[in-house]
């Protein structure tokens, strides 16, 4: 199945460069470009891309608010991959909270770009270690979560699903979780799907955000 991509950036060279690189991939097609957030919202409604590569700093409407509007409707299935110049961009955290599934540096190689699109399209998280550390630091600064019973914080999750959610928040892949829990990887995938449905979350990235913000997981040393 071909992954439909839209590129949103106010720099023409970035848009055209990424378009050329992605269109070389047999399973990826760039279906459109947008120059800012407002343009992206209009074109996304028409083109219905699977993945949007979204710049943060743009005129008219920035990438964070555009991401929030694209991903907030219940029927929305589009995944947003934030484009940044620096891996410690101060806006990455807010973009992830707004609904982005990950981030990508603008100087990424062609192979990294294509793989990032595939990962996000498949519903996986895309966070580099440096950004993961930044997120942990940001979460650690949040006010302590109310000491409500764990059951109230995680809703209808079973004990095993809660355990899987904690491992997702700690950055483990399905294969790594399967090894840790001594279960089949397909079993982990089933748990992850149920977690997302029960908590009304879009993907693993949002599951990790949820785990930290509810206090289910706290960074070591904080």
Image: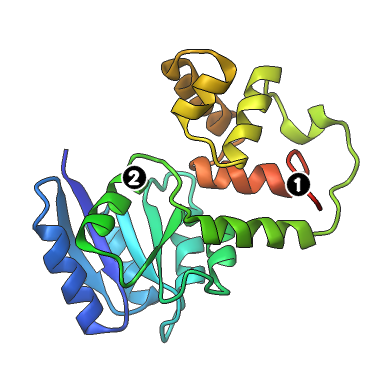
Give me the residue at 66% from left, 25% from top: 163
Q: Residues within 10 Å of mark 2 (few under 14, many from 20)?
A: some
Give me the residue at 61% from left, 33% from top: 167
Tell me residue 20's x, y (percent): 11, 67
Residue 38 position by quadrant? bottom left
Image quadrant in which the N terminus is located: top left
Left or right position of 107 against 23: right
Residue 32 appears anywhere in the view: yes
Q: Residues within 10 Å of mark 1 (few under 14, many from 20)?
A: few
Give me the residue at 16% from left, 44% from top: 2
Question: Which residue is tagged 2?
Answer: 119
In front of the other: label 2 or label 1?
1
Tell me residue 5's x, y (percent): 24, 57
Question: Which residue is tagged 1?
Answer: 220
Residue 134 position by quadrant? bottom right
Residues at circles 2 and 1 in contact by the CB criterion of under 8 Å: no
Q: Is mark 2 on a helix, strand or loop?
A: helix
């Amino acid at each position: 199945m071909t992954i439909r991509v839209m590129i949103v950036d106010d720099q023409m060279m970035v848009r055209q460069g990424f378009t050329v690189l992605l269109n070389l991939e047999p399973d990826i097609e760039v279906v459109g470009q947008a120059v800012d957030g407002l343009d992206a919202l209009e074109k996304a409604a028409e083109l219905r891309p699977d993945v949007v590569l979204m710049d943060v700093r743009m005129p008219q409407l920035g990438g964070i608010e555009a991401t929030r509007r694209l991903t907030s409707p219940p029927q929305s299935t589009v995944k947003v991959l934030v484009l940044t110049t620096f891996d410690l961009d101060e806006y990455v955290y807010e973009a992830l909270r707004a609904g982005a599934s990950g981030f990508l540096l603008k100087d990424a190689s062609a192979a990294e770009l294509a793989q990032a699109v595939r990962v996000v399209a498949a519903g996986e998280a895309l966070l580099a270690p440096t950004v993961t550390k930044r997120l942990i630091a940001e979460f650690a600064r949040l006010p302590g979560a109310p000491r409500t019973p764990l059951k109230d914080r995680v809703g209808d999750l079973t004990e095993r699903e809660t355990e899987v959610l904690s491992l997702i928040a700690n950055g483990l892949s399905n294969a790594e979780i399967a090894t840790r829990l001594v279960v089949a990887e397909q079993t982990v995938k089933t748990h992850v799907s149920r977690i997302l449905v029960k908590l009304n979350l879009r993907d693993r990235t949002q599951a990790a955000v949820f785990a930290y913000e509810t206090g289910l997981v706290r960074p070591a040393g904080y």
